[in-house]
Amino acid sequence: MLETLTREADRLGAICRDEVAGQGVPADAIALLVRAHVRYAGTDTSLEVPVAADNLGAGAQGETVLAAMREHFQAAHRARFGFIDETKPLVVEAISVEAVGGGAGIAETEEAIAASPLPEPTERTRIFSAGALREAAVYAREQLAPGHVVRGPALVIEPHQTVVIEDGWQAALTAKDHLVLTRAVALPKRTAVGTSADPVMLEIFNNLFMSIAEQMGVTLQNTAYSVNIKERLDFSCAVFDHEGALVANAPHMPVHLGSMDKSVETIIRQNEGRIRPGDVYMLNAPYNGGTHLPDITVCTPVFDQAGAEILFWVASRGHHADVGGVAPGSMSPLATTIEQEGVYIDNFKIVDEGRFREAETEALLLGATYPVRNVVQNVNDLKAQIAANEKGVRELSKVIGEFGLDVVQAYMGHVQDNAAESVRRVLDRLRNCEFTYPMDQGCAIKVRITVDKAAREATVDFTGTSPQRGDNFNAPAPVTRAAVLYVFRVMVDDDIPMNAGCLRPIRIVVPERSMLSPEYPAAVVAGNVEVSQAVTNCLFGALEAMAASQGTMNNLTFGNDEYQYYETICSGSPAGPGFNGTPGVHVHMTNSRLTDPEILEYRFPVLLEDFHIRAGSGGKGRWNAGDGTSRTIRFLKRMECAILSSHRKVRPFGMDGGEPGELGRTLVRRLDGRIDELGGCDQTGLEAGEAVTVITPTGGGFGKA
């Protein structure tokens, strides 16, 4: 290894030196930077580490270089993923060499310059500033000289732009001809809605907390292994306070984000007094904070610098392409017990004080009655989730370092207070209402929303909803809660993060042993993806806010022991008062995307024959729903294929006189040309050359045409 590294570093270094020297840089002014791309054996994520190229030769110095490379790699791996693995050998898969020389420093310093009298403005005008019309002086840029200070409200006209100086601001021309704007008059103290916090700082922290969750999501996407997470973006990331209450999230999957806090609360409750720095936990148990088994939540505590107190939590939830069960993809429409749906994970410590428990994790995933089919894919996606959480830990630590712990904790409370008051303002506009939502299975979801105007609170009561079902159309209570949180957040006009504060003024009543609160061992896989959409439509129907969406995610899975794939297929968005729907988009509780055709066909033995928008298929009304889609996939190898869907019998409702949307269909084209139509929840085997077509239902129209 040393010999190979030395040879390649010398060869690439010579090429780089010659290239830079050819640009006129003296040889003694050229420095070489050698970096190795290193990964653990059996993984596919390499990290860049520096190499001391001058000491690469054989002997003690070379061994020292290798030891330094290992040390740098472990530090980089711990920073990225939050753990290291001493048992795995390292692989150097590539090296890179960079030659640098000939640069010169640039100093940009401003000389102090005294203010000088302003010339008369070229004219005066009126501008709208800070909510009112104000008199403003107008200056041409060529009138101004270094030392001039223009106080707002004013305009400075330049050849290619106009600089607006708002009331309370001033612009100074510096010695280097830079126009620098600064606030000259302090803003009066203001408070945000529902809290005593400064509204500017509240907006900063709203976006800061959301930004942390977004950065977690980027890390997860970049390091994930499966198409389902890396390409379809079927994941969510969020930040929680020390009690597990949701503070902020990225705009990922609403059905995940509204229910993840229950997973975090479960981890806190079941491990109280035993959580240490470097520990990471995972969970998918639907009866203990999870949703359905493919959604695995990874939770990481954020400790103080002393490692003594848990300050916050970060968590990521990813939909794994397969977690076992009776069918590839773990989304079988025929499953009737939780065991048939895959591996059940309840409060499992996946990282123990910085050590990734790989052997124990694999034993868990492979030890169930229906084990996972691709444990390498599962483990690598879990490592990506751990890495995403570690990114959140680091970013929260930066925020604490910049603003102080007391300020960060205070604004975590303020953003929730602001959300609570924003929802109360929605409740002020609502009246008592109710709705019944029939489903293809013969069951129905019922809701009654009662508003207490004096207390500015509401009760969302699902009493009357059908009992727990023998199929898998059962939604664990956190899923129903997620739908309520999403709907009331959507009703808020202000740009606030979806967080626990949104539910403070709302009491949710879910009858026990109903299809919205099932008991073990009920199957639940359709509850997360189908019933969640039904609950959302039911709530919007009661509020008369918009017509029904397609009301399904059209969950298509296919695979065998080698391949497993899952996707949700979009339709059009519903119409509402004053707006038409949009064709071909995911809506409501799903916010994923479809895999690019090139990636789909590269990673799986299939061909995407057709995917198009069905013009004119959306529900009609004064405002029309968005048009649905048709998607045809042809198989190049024999696969098991399953569809888990809704609205194959009951049309999605229109609102206020609008027409309902169209029904969906799933068709299979056999080798002999015969077309079979599958049920809404069905599965079948497809031979090489056969194809499946999913025609999506469409949303309803709003208002009489």
Image (cartoon, rainbow, N blue to C red):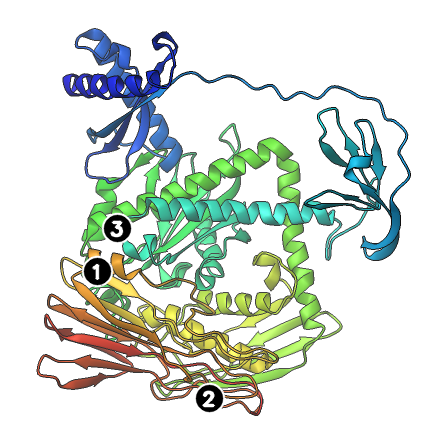
**Tag 3–tag 1 contact (CB < 8 Å):** no
The quadrant of the image that shows the C terminus is bottom right
Q: Is residue 312 visible?
A: yes
Question: Which callout, 3 or 2, points to the residue nearer the camera?
Answer: 2
Identify residue for label 1: 601
The secondary element bearing badge 3 is classed as helix
* Quarter of the figure with residue 525: bottom left
N-terminal-most mark, 3 or 1: 3
Q: Residues within 10 Å of mark 2 (few under 14, many from 20)?
A: many
Image disc number at residue 685: none
> What amino acid type is highlighted by mark number 2?
Pro
Identify residue for label 2: 660
Image disc number at residue 378: 3
The secondary element bearing badge 1 is classed as helix
Question: How much space separates mark 1 and mark 2, taking CA atoms?
Answer: 35 Å
> What amino acid type is highlighted by mark number 1?
Glu
| Residue 591 place in picture, x, y as percent | 43, 63
Left or right: where 113 falls relative to 29:
right
N-terminal-most mark, 3 or 2: 3
N-terminal-most mark, 1 or 2: 1
Left or right: where 635 falls relative to 181:
left
* Quarter of the figure with residue 94: top left
Considering depth in this image, is 449 or 625 the residue closer to the camera? 625
Question: Which callout, 3 or 1, points to the residue nearer the camera?
Answer: 1
Does residue 512 sit above or below 194 in this rendering? below
> What amino acid type is highlighted by mark number 3?
Asn
Left or right: where 487 falls relative to 336:
right
